[in-house]
Amino acid sequence: MDFGRPQENGDGPVLASHLSGIGFALEHSCDLVFVADRGGRLLFANAAARRSWGCEAGADVKKILPDEATLAIGAAVEQVFMERAPVRVEWGTLGPAGPQSWYTCTLSPLLVDDRAVGYLSVSSDVTGLKRSEQRLRRSEQLMVDTQGVAHLGTWEWDVSEPTATWSAELYRIYGLTPESYTPTYEKYLEMVHPDDRPRVIEATNRVFHEHVPYSHDERIFRPDGTLRHLHTWAHPVLDEGGQLIRLVGVCQDITDQKRAEAEVQKLNADLERRVADRTRVIESSLRDLEAFNAMASHDLRAPLSVIDGSCTLITRQFTELPKGVTDNLERIRRSTKHMTMLVNDLLALAKVGQIKLGRSNVDLSAICYEIVEQLQHAEPQRTATVTVQPGLMCVADADLMRVVLGNLLGNAWKYSARVEHAQIQVGAVEGVDNPTFFVRDNGAGFDMKDAHLLFAPFQRLHSPKEFPGTGMGLAGTQRIIERHSGRTWAEGAINQGATFFFELPPPRPAGSMPPAAASVPLAG
């Protein structure tokens, strides 16, 4: 809007005289102040305006103001002259990133003989206030968004008023709208579940009379009849005299949480039922296993002993038997011995799951020394170098660890028998979280593609003619380590030896790392 054309009506000298009395105050004001006549000619600009706009008296106002101010002030000037009343507008300067500063401008008409001959413009810098308002609006919107995400509504009740103030999210939680519902205590109680209503009333009375905050779960019915679970907090606000003046509170919709809890309880109940059923099956299986053990201990081993004894008796009583008969009797005795070993190993494997675990500090190195000495005594003709790392310690069942090391060292001793310079090493793996031990040999080894068969019962990677055995030792080893919440695995290569590892949970308290290994050569 144009400010108008300069007019030669003599208003300038009149305005100059009119303004002489307040000139000092306007000159030193922090606001941007200028006076223009009806034609838009600048009659006065204070120091702040001159610094900002570089203007002098007599200039055309629309040429000295920023474009944004020209548009805002120019549009209001016509209204000022028309209504002869002050008008307030806002304008701001823009930069590359948006508004840089904001001003509130008040335009006041200057009257002479009841005639508007000019106007006074006072622009106050409200940039700080505007930015605070923007931050406040952003905070309010963030709070609204957060309440929606968290299903969290807020309320406030001035106890001197009959109604409360609810947030938009609280209306949504209750399935209501501000247009259809005015929050009052009585209407709120009508929505509370009848079973929860006495507890809500009691909590409200306490916060009113005793000023005790409350926090509880409650159920409400929405207008459409749906049930919602809420958690409500209320806090009293007191005046300086300790009198209650208002209540503030928060209400969270926890319906989804309650449904999830109910589902978890249902799953837990189903799981408990399944565990009970499974426990009964396991107990029944254990009873069957005990019956099998009793049967195997007597009904299987007893006939085998009779067969072996009968063969021995026949051989002793009949010294001139045909060679074919003698060979068959010897074959029968070997088979009965193998069957007896197999039954014994089966019984040992079955007992592993029934033995009650003991927990103590176990010196694995000392056990290894004893086992190696027994192996050497059984085969004094063998020459082998066995290296046992001193100070190998763990927390486990000592008797079962003896079985584990007996199986692993026995295998290493057996499968390295055909090596000219047999070497067996027992040690601990360094740089791992849990105690991990290994038994290594340079014997027959195995193909890694068959590693999954090593710990399976009755599985053997070599024929009985090459290396005798039942295939049950490693299965028992794995079962023992698993009962200690550990694990076993193996690495190897054909004719390059094998390494068997077993890992146990960390001891309490954790011990220090064992010292360096020491070699113990055993010569036949």
Image (cartoon, grey):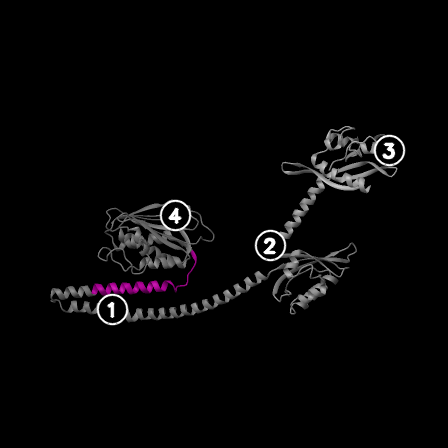
Residue beneath disc 3: 18
Q: Label 2 to label 1, Cα distance in Å?
A: 78 Å
Between discs 3 and 4, the one toward the N terminus = 3
Q: Is residue 132 visible?
A: yes
Q: Tell me whether the residue at label 3 lies in contact with that at label 2, contact meaning CB atoms closer than 8 angstroms.
A: no
Quarter of the image for residue 486 reads: bottom left
| Image: magenta residue range | 333-360
Q: Label 3 to label 4, Cα distance in Å?
A: 101 Å
Mark 3 or mark 1, whichever is nearer to me: 3
Q: Label 3 to label 2, Cα distance in Å?
A: 62 Å
Mark 2 or mark 1, whichever is nearer to me: 2
Residue beneath disc 2: 149
Mark 4: give few (<14), some (14-19) or many (20+) Cα within 10 Å: some
Numbered mark located on residue 429 in the image: 4
Nearer to us in this view, 237 or 505:
237
Q: Residue furthest right?
A: 113
Residue beneath disc 1: 305
